[in-house]
Image (tube, rainbow, N blue to C red):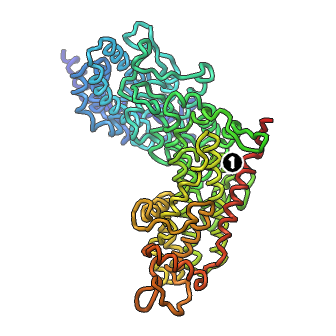
Amino acid sequence: MAAIGRVGQWLTDQAPDLYRRRDLAYEAEKIDVDVFGNRLPGAVVRPGLTRIDESRLIPAGVRAEAGLAASLMQAAARGDADATERLLAYHGRMSDPRFATALIEQLGAWGLVMLPAAMGAQVRMALDAGDGSAQALRRRNREVLSMLGKALATATDPSKDAHVTRRFQEELKRQGRAEIPVPGMRGQLTIHGYGALGQILAAAPAEAFSTSFMTTIGHDLIRWDRDFLKQHGEWPLARDLDAYDLPAPLDTRPFSGSGDIGVVDPVAALLTVAGSSRERAQALIGSRDLLTYLLRDRRPQWEMGDRGESLGEAMEAAMKGSDADSKRLAVMATQIYSDVVGSHLSIDDAGNIGIKDASELDRLSGARDNMARILAEHTEDMVFAHFQRHPRLPDDQLTGEVDGRATARFNPTDLDRVLLDVAIDDQAYQALLHAQLAHLRGGIDLGLATRDKDFTDNAIALDSAALGHLSEARRTALVGWGREADAADEALRKLVKEGVGLVPVPFAQQVGKLGINAADGIYESFIRDGYVKAGDWLVKQSGHAGGKTKEAYSDAASDDIAAQELVKQMLASSAVAHGAYRRDDLNERFVIGDPPRVKDPILMSRDEYDGFSRWLADNSTVPADFGEARQSADTGATTFQKNVRAGTSSDG
């Protein structure tokens, strides 16, 4: 008995060290070394011994709590409402790296994907019973899966002190690609692991999954989806009425234009998560291979769900920044997008551009407004693309650098084909138009502020040409989709009629006080939040939305020289803001103050503005020939037609 007592005491004394040794083994596995620090076969660690950081160890007490939480999750997935209620006590622990890692390890890759499957089975039985219990069940499921999503995001982040192993991720990939029998369905229903993972991601769309997750699990999920669709043709998104399919565990509505509850597209769920940050989005869709699949080959599948809305959000997050990676991906996307549009273009005997089966292009209609906003934020590069006319460049030459800033080397033909597709969407066209207005407005104002006539003339010529490309894209798109072509210029004409060009650039008059060296900074601040927002601001200040401007400044706003009138308005406003006019005999009705100065055109009455327009031609430093704007716009429209026709087959 004494000997047994001594052994028992020894075990008690050694327990902390035994627990420590066990946890060292866990930790060693995470960095692919044995407990002595030696590299395991196939491990990716630096050669030689690796010291295990004991601060990363998960205490036994934390593992015990995580084990209880895992059991509660499994019970909740089987429909146990009490288990769901008890599980909520652990809500705040899901962002704790040690607890989250212990929980995910306790569930295992198989157990992780089985939870949404088990929930779907319970929902199926509730729907079949017709007792109205499915709604409450789905609310509870959302609580559980959102917690699980947070834990998964935390545990798969390699920057955390504790995280799952490389082996776990490989096992999750294996289970993701596997077809698993749904529990409780007697082998009659199966689910793919990645399909189940998509339901977890859908419950946690704002969670900060790591870029590592995107490049490992995320990339493999998309590749599995590509392999699956190549073999089976489609990925059916089951609705509740599909009695022989596993329904959605949550009340998700993944169908564009429909409020039906259905199973979430796992790729769409992944892209939604990735779209919450630039870094995540770039990590997920940063390769031409995957981006081509998503933009070109997956279109039939997008049509079944959100028509590419989730893809568009991820693309916008990844591509509209001013950094080199954003610009590289934006150019890459236009190349891929252009090829898709080009394959659906035709030329009739009269030389008119047509759209072959527009519904094929509409499969990705949900991404049009995002693509437009991407291009809008690269308006500067678009304007110069039409002037520089880069050929289509390889991936290692898609960006350049000017004055320390990254630039996008768009091919003008690619741009015009993309514009043709996105311009059919009203919101997309508006975003592009407003951005172009902001760019032109800033260029004219900066040129007059610095008294740089060449800069002003170039801004008018280049931006008016770009505006011509956009207007012609809108007109061609409307014709191609069978809509009224006269509406092509309606948006621009209305803005000119409302006097959008007369709105002064914010703080422009400070240039005179601070000196022309301050001009660059003022115009940088004007577009600080992007060209679209700057253009939206101009529109809001005009009569179009703000009600500050009188209507009908010129009859020209209703005919085909709207671009010329727009430039005239901008020149007039900037000339007044920067005093770019002769001050002799300032005694007109539009002159105010002492010393006398010309009233801000946006504040003039109709009669005052008419008189001011006549006076301006004789008394300002602004070039008298406003026809440059119209000529450049016409040239832009003609060039658009030539670009789009390039490489397009004739119907005849």
Compared with 56, 539 (above or below) is: below
What residue is rendered at 39% in x and 19% in y?
A: 240
- Which quadrant would the N terminus be assigned to in this image? top left
What residue is rendered at 62% in x and 19% in y?
A: 231
Horizontally, residue 6 falls left or right of residue 383, namely: left
Q: Nearer the viewer, residue 40 or 298?
A: 298
Helix, strand or loop at label 1? It is helix
Q: Of all residues shown, which one is farthest toward the right?
A: 652
User: Residue 315: x and y, percent?
Assistant: 54, 44
Q: Of all residues shown, which one is farthest toward the top?
A: 186
- Name the residue type under label 1: Asp
Compared with 616, 497 (above or below) is: above
Q: Nearer the viewer, residue 471 or 590?
A: 590
What residue is rendered at 58% in x and 28% in y?
A: 300
What residue is rendered at 60% in x and 44% in y?
A: 478
User: Residue 235: x and y, percent?
Assistant: 53, 23
Residue at which label 1 appears: 414
User: Residue 433: x and y, percent?
Assistant: 55, 56
Compared with 454, 38 (above or below) is: above
Q: Nearer the viewer, residue 439 or 320?
A: 439
User: Residue 353: x and y, percent?
Assistant: 71, 43
